[in-house]
Image (cartoon, helix red, strand yellow):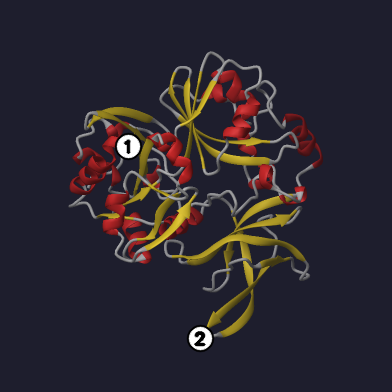
Amino acid sequence: MSSSRGHYTQVVHTTPFHSRTARANVLNVWHRWRDHTVADAYFDVSLEYTALRNACAVFDISPMTKHRISGPDALEYLNRLVTRDVARIRPGRVGYCVWCDDRGQVIDDGTLFHVEPGVYRLCSQERQLDWLSRSALGFDVAIREETEEVAALALQGPTSCAVLRALGLSGVESLVPFAMRSYAFAGGELLVSRTGFTGDLGYELWTGNAQAEALWDALFEAGRLHGIRPMGTHALEMARIEAGFIQAGVDFLPADRAVRTDRTRSPFELDLAWLVDFAKPNFTGRRALLEEERRGPRFRLVRLDVEGNKPAKDAYVYDDRRNVIGAVTSALWSPMAKASIALASVRMPWGRPTDELWAEIYYQKELKWSRLNARCRVVTGPFYAPERRRQTPPADF
């Protein structure tokens, strides 16, 4: 049996970095990300998070779904697919985007890399090949999933640029946010983008499977004096909530997976109105989104500063008359904000900065459950946004 056919007989795969991540994972804590085994934690979640915010941390993002889109109609196709104007994403740049169904409900979000003229890479959490292929009817484009062909690491934190400079990547300090540059590495190519899911200074590194282990080893040698550590999904989850970033399947239900259509959300209901460009040509969901803009959305995504120190995980959100108006989708005690923070979806018109909201929190200590009602303050913008995230060139360490 060929390796390509054998791929579909194996239930769970390891990433190209598994020989290194397995050796580093002294806790032996893993989970399944799509079809791959990835580490939830390596040695201590709080220390992994601390490395991210005070030095730098490495996260294996190889399982992220990656599609290569190319051809004469690639730009026109992508502009029909996503809600933002792709023409503004120039070669060598990356753009965050969402795509919707005909009802204007979000199917997924992701990052779009304009690798070279007429060639793009679309990265997302969910598999999208079926939707992308159906949407390509009438366009001269080639769409290929390349998830298994690309090894990728996220290097995030204040010393991340210093590590890349120590690795010998000349000029990497001049990369502005959402820019990318290619380098020769270990007999192949290394694509470096100034992107990430932590709200901090950081980069994502993309290379071939054959170069994966060499990249891991070189990174950790270059970062030996810069506090580099591996990081699992638990620490990453803490960082992305502090940054106010949403996650498919957690903060919204992908529209193509919904059984109950009233459970999905539009870009307007996910605080992503800035990604909807009605000035560009027609795109999927445009008519429904125009109507929604006219009548107003049903829900609002809010960021909440929750009174006290108990995480409001899965909490109901109430108005000042104790009517249920929504629910928390993500929550934690934030070490950087020194507060209990949460993302929540609430019914309109609630969620204004002046609204008095409450979260009903249940928590357990030594098998005893307690219940409390905590006052919530609506926060505008991310909970944590260090200046170094956008500083160019970053500070050297």
Using the image, tell me which numbered label, if any, was put on residue 322. none
- The percent position of residue 4, horizontal first and vertical second, equals 43, 34
Q: Amino acid at mark 1?
A: Asn
In-image side of 121 versus 185 (left or right)? right
* Residue at (65, 33) in percent of width and height: 276
* Residue at (26, 30) in percent of width and height: 171
Residue carrying label 2: 366
- The percent position of residue 224, horizontal first and vertical second, equals 18, 52
Using the image, tell me which numbered label, if any, was put on residue 209. 1
- Secondary structure at numbered mark 2: loop
Q: Nearer the viewer, residue 217 or 203?
A: 217
Dot 2 or dot 1: first in sequence order is 1
CA separation in Å, label 2 and label 1 = 47 Å
Decide: is 101 above or below 298: above
- The percent position of residue 321, horizontal first and vertical second, equals 78, 70
Q: Which quadrant would the N terminus be assigned to in this image?
A: top left
